[in-house]
Image (cartoon, grey):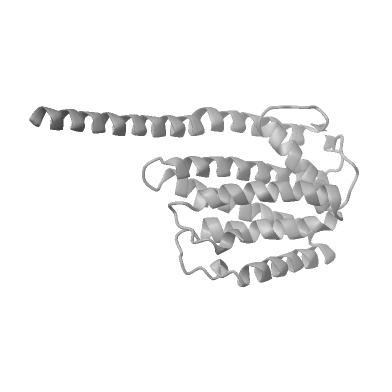
Amino acid sequence: MLAEQDMTTKDNFIYLTIALTTLLLSTALAQQFFDPSAQRLVQSTTVITLLSIVWGAKNEKLFLRKAFIFPVAIVLTSLGGYWLDNVNLEYAHLLLLLVFFIFTAIQTTKLVMLAGKVDSNKILGAICLYLLLGLIWALIYTLIELNIPGSFKGLKSSEHWFELFPTFVYFSFVTLTTLGFGDIAPTLPLSQFFVYFQAVCGQFYLAILVASMVGSRISAISNKHAQRFRDRYMQDQDD
């Protein structure tokens, strides 16, 4: 799988983009065709994949990079989540996931912002960070609804996070991109705050961060071509 690849800080975001896109699709497929509890396995795969790609970007000897350990780690993580849910530690499970995603987003930000010049891999990293933000907010919405039922309208009533989370993944990205279909909507002040704050963050992220990175990359490519043209011209003059 993705963890089998030889990933470095040079190309890790290519794999992370593929991984996150695949895992978001897996969340939808699990919701559509399988028992809701299958979401545990999907989220465990997400955690292990992020560990191997983001947190292992600078550690070529990370044990999770071994192919035979990758599926074992997924199963163990899934069983750990199942145990937490069954001993009434569902909130602890979600909080651990939330903390993990937040720190992964911070680690991704460091790799994108603080590691050399802007290149195509870093632009992909900025896109990955955008996807991580959507997942972070989905977890926040899930926690709010579980603690304060009725915070959102348009949901099927459920007491299990793995039934709510896929729906909130959809709602989170609809909000982050300010599509606003209206099929799900916040009803209480707290949930309304997180929704409009996410919409604001999503717009500023695309308009400022990603746009500036793309602009810097285009400028660097243009300067590189211009320098080549000047060097060629000077060489022709010397000849």
User: Residue at the front extreme?
Assistant: 239
Number of labels in the image equals 0
User: Residue at the right extreme?
Assistant: 157
Left or right: 168, with 202 as reference point: right
| Residue 147 location (% of width, % of height) | 81, 47
Task: Residue 50: name its quadrant.
Answer: bottom right
Between residues 3 and 87, which one lies in front from this camera angle? 3
| Residue 125 location (% of width, % of height) | 51, 44
Left or right: 228, with 150 as reference point: left
| Residue 161 location (% of width, % of height) | 81, 52
Q: Which residue shows up at 91% across the image and 44% down it?
A: 157
Between residues 146 and 68, which one lies in front from this camera angle? 68
Between residues 21 and 237, which one lies in front from this camera angle? 237
Left or right: 157, with 26 as reference point: right
The vertical placement of 32 against 58, above or below, is: above
Let me know if residue 75 appears in the view. yes
Q: Which residue shows up at 78% across the image and 27% down it?
A: 181
Task: Residue 196: name its quadrant.
Answer: top right
Between residues 59 and 101, which one lies in front from this camera angle? 59
Q: Which residue shows up at 62% across the image and 61% down it?
A: 1
The vertical placement of 44 against 137, above or below, is: below
The vertical placement of 63 against 180, above or below, is: below
Q: Which residue shows up at 36% across the image and 29% down it?
A: 219
Let me know if residue 92 appears in the view. no
- Of the 4 image quadrants, the one containing the C terminus is top left
| Residue 18 location (% of width, % of height) | 60, 49
